Image (cartoon, coloured by chain):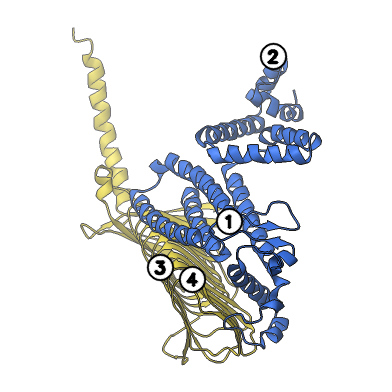
């Protein structure tokens, strides 16, 4: 009689025994709203957040601390920091804990991480959300398919490559010590105060760079490209776009050789070139030497205008690093 | 069987050219050996990928017509040996080289770069000897000569510019006793077929011809990358796809604009360079997204 009853009873008993234990473990885990771990100098930090924004702030301390907030409900979300070893390096992986998998697509978690400024930050790749990194030594590699990227006070006198890629969203960077490379599909890019080379490429959008101590290569397919600030004799400045204007505003003082080309747009310059080859026809070009001709300037637009202007050096731009 | 032996016959195994017993031995070895098995899997994957590309990308009909034409020309000039060599090369290359999509794109870009480079170089060298006959180039001051000596780079750019302007102005219906004829160069009338005949080589492509050829090659490369992107569509976020669509539309507008100018000014190398640049932008973008 009731041959299956025994099995059912055992199953019920097991569930009754296991459930409270599981809840206990989960509770303990979920209670970790804010995580903080001590890290050694030069440790590697991996930051992951597939639910939204990431903000990383370098500090003078020696701990990594993380806080995550669900933006729709303004509630804190547990964070996990997993410590591991890779070679002779300690690796800390920081990520918010996914707690509501049923409504996963609606979750919008912002993750804020504070790290010692001398740690090594692993590349960050997210599908959507903004990435912000401030006060960090060494290079960073950041990519978001859909979101803004901002990088400020990054790098050190030793340098460090800053690589930023975005599908759509704005890119802004300032006070960077090291080379900067930016690739974007559709963005407005603004970079200022860099001690290193800057190479920025966008398919559709604007590029504005200022106060760069290094080579500058700004390329847009459709959009305005501009440079403002002092130029240096040892560096090259190449600003090119197919459709859009090219503006270069520089103070008088350093000599340069300029190749200015505007195929069907206007071409204007405030500088007087003593020896100039200028074609007044459709394919407008000015090739000339100013002063000692040491610096190299190439400005090029197919359907937009090209403008090389003289400005007075302004002191309002604060380049800290 | 040892790893060395197995690796030695890996290609034959993948191509199905290994006889029964050797094939079984190699397969048995790979079942035991992780690295060999991994390598075999990788090679098989590459092979499959390559096959897919070959199947999906149809060469343009113009390519075959050009190839036939070139072969016929070869036949007329050098009847037997080169043709045999070409046939051997054609037979060897697809099997011997592991052509990846990136390599194919790189080859196309190199070819286009070379074609444009040669075109600009030819224009420069053909006209530079005639500069003294036309000293009044618009906007050039007499002291530009001294400036040329100062920086070699600048001189190079200036020469190119002069050559381009010179070329544009001097393209006239050929007549006896013209400077072009004296220097061994004949240029057809602007409204004609646009074929220019230079004294030193039998056929030199016009700027327009080079542009059209380059365009074909760019289109082939774009087709390869587009099909690659199509395959990866599922892995790309909708937001990125939407931005990509917008950016590609912008670039296509630029291509159309530069193409229009290149057609209107078929002898202007700068117009062709802008057209090539517009295509280059599209390739760059597709390459970027497919590598994400």
Whether residue A165 appears in this view of the structure is no
Q: What element does badge 4 sit on?
A: loop
Look at 44% across and 85% down and name the residue there. A318
Q: Residue at x 57, y 88 (%)?
A: A273
- x%, y% of residue A87? 61, 53
Chain letter, disc 2 residue:
B
* Alpha carbon distance from label 2 to label 3: 63 Å
Cα gap from disc 2 to disc 4, whole angstroms: 66 Å
Residue B15 drawn at (x, y percent)? 65, 25
Q: Which mark is residue B20?
A: 2
Instruction: Give the color of chain B as drawn.
Output: blue
> Chain A is which colour?
yellow
- Asked if marks 3 and 1 touch (Cβ < 8 Å), the reply is no
Q: Dot 2: few (<14), some (14–19), or many (≥20) neighbours within 10 Å?
A: few
Q: Earlier in the sequence, mark 3 or mark 4?
A: 3
Name the residue carrying label 3.
A223
User: Which quadrant does the N terminus of chain B fall into?
Assistant: top right
Label 1 residue SS: loop
Residue A141 visible to the viewer: yes
> CB atoms at circles 1 and 2 under 8 Å apart?
no
């Amino acid at each position: 009689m009731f041959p299956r009853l025994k099995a059912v009873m055992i199953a019920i008993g097991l569930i009754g025994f296991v459930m409270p234990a599981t809840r206990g473990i989960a509770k303990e885990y979920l209670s970790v709203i804010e995580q903080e771990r001590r890290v050694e100098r030069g440790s590697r930090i991996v930051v992951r957040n597939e639910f939204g924004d990431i903000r990383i702030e370098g500090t003078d301390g020696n701990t990594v601390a993380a806080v995550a907030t669900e933006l729709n409900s303004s509630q804190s979300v547990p964070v996990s920091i997993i410590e591991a070893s890779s070679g002779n390096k300690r690796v800390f992986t920081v990520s918010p804990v996914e707690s509501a998998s049923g409504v996963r697509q609606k979750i919008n978690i912002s993750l804020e991480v504070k790290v010692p400024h001398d740690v090594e930050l692993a590349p960050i790749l997210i599908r959507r959300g903004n990435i912000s990194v401030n006060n960090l030594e060494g290079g960073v590699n950041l990519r978001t398919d859909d979101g803004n990227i901002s990088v400020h006070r990054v790098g050190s006198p030793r340098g460090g490559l800053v690589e930023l890629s975005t599908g759509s969203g704005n890119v802004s960077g300032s006070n960077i010590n090291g080379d900067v490379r930016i690739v974007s599909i559709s963005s407005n890019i603004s970079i200022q105060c860099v001690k290193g080379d800057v190479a920025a490429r966008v398919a559709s959008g604007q590029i504005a760079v200022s106060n760069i101590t290094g080579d500058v290569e700004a390329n847009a397919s459709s959009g305005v490209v501009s440079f403002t600030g002092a130029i240096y004799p040892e560096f090259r400045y190449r600003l090119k776009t197919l459709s859009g204007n090219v503006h270069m505003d520089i103070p008088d003082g350093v000599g340069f050789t300029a190749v200015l080309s505007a195929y069907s747009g206007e071409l204007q310059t405030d500088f007087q070139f003593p020896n100039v080859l200028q074609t007044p026809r459709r394919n407008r070009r000015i090739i000339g030497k100013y002063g000692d001709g040491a610096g190299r300037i190439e400005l090029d637009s197919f359907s937009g205008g090209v403008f090389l202007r003289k400005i007075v050096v302004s002191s309002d731009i604060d380049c800290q690093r | 069987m040892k790893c060395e032996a197995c690796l030695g016959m890996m290609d034959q195994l993948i191509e199905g050219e290994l006889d029964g017993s050797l094939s079984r031995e190699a397969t048995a070895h790979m079942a035991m050996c992780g690295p060999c098995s991994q390598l075999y899997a990788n090679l098989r994957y590459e092979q499959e990928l390559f096959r897919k590309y070959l199947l999906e990308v149809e060469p343009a009909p113009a390519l075959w017509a050009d190839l036939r034409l070139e072969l016929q020309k070869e036949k007329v000039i050098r009847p037997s040996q080169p043709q045999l060599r070409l046939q051997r090369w054609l037979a060897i290359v697809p099997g011997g080289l592991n052509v990846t999509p990136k390599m194919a794109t790189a080859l196309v870009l190199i070819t286009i770069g070379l074609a444009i480079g040669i075109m600009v170089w030819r224009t420069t060298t053909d006209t530079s000897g005639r500069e003294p006959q036309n000293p009044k180039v618009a906007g050039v001051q007499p002291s530009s000569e001294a400036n040329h000596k100062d920086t070699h780079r600048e001189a190079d750019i200036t020469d190119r510019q002069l050559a381009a302007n010179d070329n544009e102005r001097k393209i006239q219906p050929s007549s006896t006793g013209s400077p072009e004829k004296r220097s061994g160069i004949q240029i057809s009338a602007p409204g004609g077929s646009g074929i220019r005949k230079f004294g030193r080589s039998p056929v030199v492509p016009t700027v327009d011809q080079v542009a059209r050829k380059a365009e074909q090659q760019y289109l082939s490369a774009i087709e390869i990358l587009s099909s690659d992107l199509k395959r990866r569509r599922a892995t790309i976020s909708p937001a990125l796809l939407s931005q990509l669509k917008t950016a590609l539309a912008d670039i296509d507008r630029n291509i159309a604009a530069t193409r229009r100018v290149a057609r209107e000014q078929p002898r202007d190398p700068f117009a062709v360079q802008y057209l090539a640049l517009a295509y280059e932008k599209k390739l760059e973008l597709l390459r970027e997204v497919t590598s994400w």
